[in-house]
Image (tube, rainbow, N blue to C red):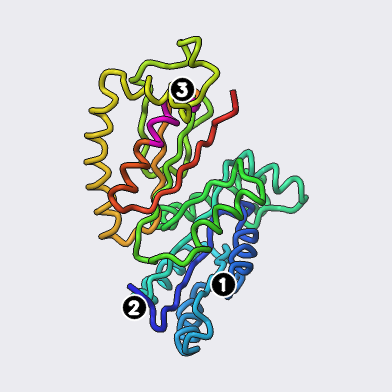
């Protein structure tokens, strides 16, 4: 639901060390009014102030940090309260792998806020468990494990920088290679390894799924077009449900062995079908070029 006077609200939260400050700075550069470390109980107060500004403040981003073990329930309560007032805050949740978080904390030589007298990994595990439900309710989850600062800023800008219909569903179609690991922030995962691998065709091996020859080879294999037709129907059902539930972002991960041929070609085809159906789509090829 659109907020009074066109007010947009984003709550930036997630794991410590996952990039909340970078995301907040990006939003600030994009023209959002950013409040850092806002206690959840004050979220409705910020929304009231923005609503009374008569359009002077149209975009508010609040960064919610871990302050107590009641944090996640407090924030959920605050979000529910603002929704009852006709404002739907979008929740951006940032996370990263344990290895990435450990490296980041060790590089700045500071303890984890929930570490206490234990080890760094204990603090990370405790915070991850505390925020589990909040992550599940988030509108957009970004895994920053493999992202540099510029890449993270680019993803935040893509999601919140353009003037878009805030009730619309934005879908990212991501190709990947299973041998490099599943994308942890995927909402849906497609496995294309049932198709013959162009890697074993000598003339196709150096090419990628973006090349016409590879695309034509993949699409001509038995089951490829039928799969696209049937999965398109699944996507129509799922995306319609996401819209009804107020979900603004979805990540469709399309995988093959190395993320070079089949997943790339099929991701492009699924994205094209989604666009033709009127869905806003971004395509990313995570592992292209890693071989």
Secondary structure of the residue carrying tag 2 is loop
Task: Evaluate whether residue 26 shows in this view.
Answer: yes
Task: Evaluate whether residue 81 shows in this view.
Answer: no
Classify the position of the C terminus by image quarter: top right
- Say which quarter of the image contains residue 61: bottom right
- The residue labelled by disc 1 is 32
The residue at 40%/35% (across/down) is 267
**Could you tell which of marks 2 and 1 lies nearer the N-terminus?**
1
> Is 243 positioned to the left or the right of 18 in the image?
left
Give the percent coordinates (x, y) of residue 251: 41, 46
Name the foreground residue: 67 vs 179: 179
Q: Nearer the viewer, mark 2 or mark 1?
A: 1
Give the percent coordinates (x, y) of residue 112: 66, 53
Name the foreground residue: 144 vs 30: 30
**Most distant residue in the front direction:** 212
In the rendered view, tell whether residue 208 sits above or below residue 11.
Answer: above
Give the percent coordinates (x, y) of residue 50: 49, 83
In the rendered view, tell whether residue 92 sits above or below residue 282.
Answer: below
**Could you tell which of marks 1 and 3 lies nearer the N-terminus?**
1
Secondary structure of the residue carrying tag 1 is loop
Q: Residues within 10 Å of mark 1 (few under 14, many from 20)?
A: many
Give the magenta-colored segment's residue range.
259-268
CB contact under 8 Å: marks 3 and 2: no
Classify the position of the N terminus by image quarter: bottom left
- The residue labelled by disc 2 is 86
The residue at 38%/31% (across/down) is 266
CB contact under 8 Å: marks 2 and 1: no
Q: Residues within 10 Å of mark 3 (few under 14, many from 20)?
A: some
The residue at 63%/67% (across/down) is 29
Q: Nearer the viewer, mark 3 or mark 2?
A: 3
* Mark identifier at residue 257: 3
């Amino acid at each position: 639901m659109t907020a009074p006077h066109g007010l947009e609200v984003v709550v930036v939260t997630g794991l410590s060390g996952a990039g909340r400050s970078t995301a907040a700075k990006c939003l600030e550069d994009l023209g959002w009014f950013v409040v850092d470390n806002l206690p959840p109980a004050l979220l409705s107060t910020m929304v009231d102030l923005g609503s009374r500004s008569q359009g002077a403040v149209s975009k508010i981003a609040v960064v919610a940090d871990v302050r107590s073990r009641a944090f996640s329930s407090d924030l959920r309560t605050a979000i529910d309260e603002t929704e009852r007032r006709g404002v739907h805050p979008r929740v951006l949740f940032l996370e990263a792998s344990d290895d990435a978080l450990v490296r980041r904390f060790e590089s700045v030589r500071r303890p984890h806020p929930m570490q206490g007298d234990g080890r760094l990994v204990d603090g990370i595990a405790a915070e991850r468990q505390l925020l589990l439900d909040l992550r599940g309710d988030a509108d957009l989850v970004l895994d920053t494990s493999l992202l540099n600062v510029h890449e993270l800023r680019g993803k935040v800008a893509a999601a919140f920088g353009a003037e878009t219909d805030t009730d619309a569903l934005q879908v990212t179609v991501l190709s990947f290679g299973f041998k490099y690991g599943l994308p942890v922030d995927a909402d849906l995962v497609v496995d294309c390894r049932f198709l013959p691998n162009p890697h074993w065709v000598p003339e196709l091996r150096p090419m990628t799924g973006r090349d016409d020859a590879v695309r034509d080879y993949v699409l001509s294999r038995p089951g490829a077009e039928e799969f696209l037709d049937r999965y398109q129907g699944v996507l129509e059902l799922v995306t319609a449900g996401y819209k009804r539930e107020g979900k603004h972002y979805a990540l469709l991960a399309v995988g093959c062995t190395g993320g070079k041929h089949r997943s790339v070609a099929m991701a492009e085809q699924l994205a094209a079908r989604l666009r033709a159906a009127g869905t806003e789509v971004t395509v990313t090829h995570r592992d292209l070029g890693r071989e």
